[in-house]
Image: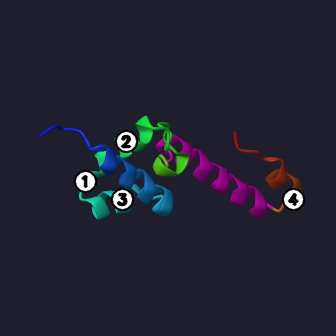
């Protein structure tokens, strides 16, 4: 058996994807792999090859940036407690 989808099956993939917009649902309904569905849709231009920003997990802040933010907050509190109103507002984080 060939390792390719038959034309009628490809037509079903396209139709279901246009209705559902879900690769997972198409694959499950037709009993084929998600990557097979994804590859067919990419090859035919239904979906873009680029990665969506929403798909990429946000990188946790680096330890250095977290320490800088903490230093900024602590310095702001120190200036605010010292009673010098202009000191806290003039201080800026870099």
The Cα atoms of the two marked residues, 4 and 2, are separated by 64 Å
Q: Residues within 10 Å of mark 2 (few under 14, many from 20)?
A: some
Q: Name the spot of residue 94 as percent of width and height, x first.
A: 69, 39
The Cα atoms of the two marked residues, 1 and 2, are separated by 11 Å
Q: Could you tell me if the residues under marks 4 and 1 are in contact, i.e. CB atoms within 8 Å? A: no
Mark 3 or 1 closer to N-term? Answer: 3
Q: Which residue is mark 4?
A: 85
Q: Could you tell me if the residues under marks 3 and 1 are in contact, i.e. CB atoms within 8 Å? A: no
Q: Residues within 10 Å of mark 4 (few under 14, many from 20)?
A: few
Q: Name the spot of residue 12 as percent of width and height, x first.
A: 37, 55
Q: Name the spot of residue 58 as percent of width and height, x first.
A: 49, 49
Q: Which residue is mark 2?
A: 40
User: Where 28 sits versus 45, above or below?
Assistant: below
Q: Could you tell me if the residues under marks 4 and 2 are in contact, i.e. CB atoms within 8 Å? A: no
On residue 26, which mark appears?
3
Q: Secondary structure at mark 3?
A: helix
Q: Which residues are magenta?
A: 60-82
Give the quadrant of the N terminus: top left
Is 75 one of the magenta-colored residues?
A: yes
Q: Name the spot of residue 45 as percent of width and height, x first.
A: 49, 38
Q: Secondary structure at mark 1?
A: loop
Residue drawn at x 55%, y 43% as measured from the top left? 65
| Of 53 and 73, the residue lying toward us | 53
Mark 1 or 2 closer to N-term? Answer: 1
Q: Residues within 10 Å of mark 1 (few under 14, many from 20)?
A: some
Q: Which secondary structure dominates the residues rendered in magenta?
A: helix
Q: Which residue is mark 1?
A: 32
Mark 2 or 3 closer to N-term? Answer: 3
Mark 3 or 4 closer to N-term? Answer: 3
Q: Secondary structure at mark 2?
A: helix
Is 65 one of the magenta-colored residues?
A: yes
| Of 16 and 86, the residue lying toward us | 16
């Amino acid at each position: 058996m060939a390792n390719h989808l038959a034309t009628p099956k490809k037509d079903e993939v396209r139709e279901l994807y246009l209705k559902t917009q879900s690769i997972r649902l198409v694959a499950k309904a037709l009993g084929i792999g998600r990557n097979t569905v994804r590859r067919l849709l990419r090859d035919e231009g239904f979906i873009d090859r680029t990665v969506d920003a929403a798909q990429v997990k946000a990188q946790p802040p680096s330890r250095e940036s977290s320490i800088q933010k903490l230093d900024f907050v602590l310095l702001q509190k120190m200036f605010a407690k010292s009673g010098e109103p202009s000191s806290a507002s003039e201080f800026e984080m870099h």
